[in-house]
Amino acid sequence: MTNTKRCQKYREMQKPLVEKDEPTEKSYKSGFPSHSSRHFITQKIVDGFCKATAPAKFEEAGCAVCGLLTLQMELFKLNSLDID
């Protein structure tokens, strides 16, 4: 069995478990804190951490004008600017 087929089989087996844990409108109204809402909050915290520590958030490059190291998110590509 190839690795792709094994991965596909594993995902198919996990799919019902993931769908079962998804938060629903009912889970917010029923007792506090419910298992699914805790799972949802944990997932939200992990997602926020991953976005905050993404490589794009701290990679630096030299500015073409002054040479100062600057976050790549704050820089513009020279070919995207209208400069002679």
Image (cartoon, rainbow, N blue to C red):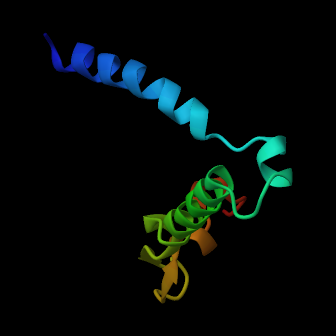
Does residue 19 appear left or right of residue 54 in this picture? right
Q: x%, y% of residue 60?
A: 44, 77
Identified at 70% across, 63% down, the residue is 33
Q: x%, y% of residue 66?
A: 52, 88
Identified at 55% across, 82% down, the residue is 65
Identified at 49% across, 64% down, the residue is 50
Does residue 13 appear left or right of residue 39 in this picture? left
Query: Is residue 9 shown above or below 54?
Result: above
Q: x%, y% of residue 29?
A: 86, 52
Please state the total of marks drawn on the protein image.
0
- Observer-nearest of 25 and 59: 25
Q: Residue furthest left?
A: 1
Q: Residue furthest top?
A: 1
- Observer-nearest of 11 and 3: 11
- Observer-nearest of 60 and 52: 52
Which quadrant: the N terminus?
top left
Which quadrant: the C terminus?
bottom right
Dividing the picture into quadrants, the one containing residue 42 is bottom right
Q: x%, y% of residue 18?
A: 52, 35
Query: Is residue 13 shown above or below 2?
Result: below
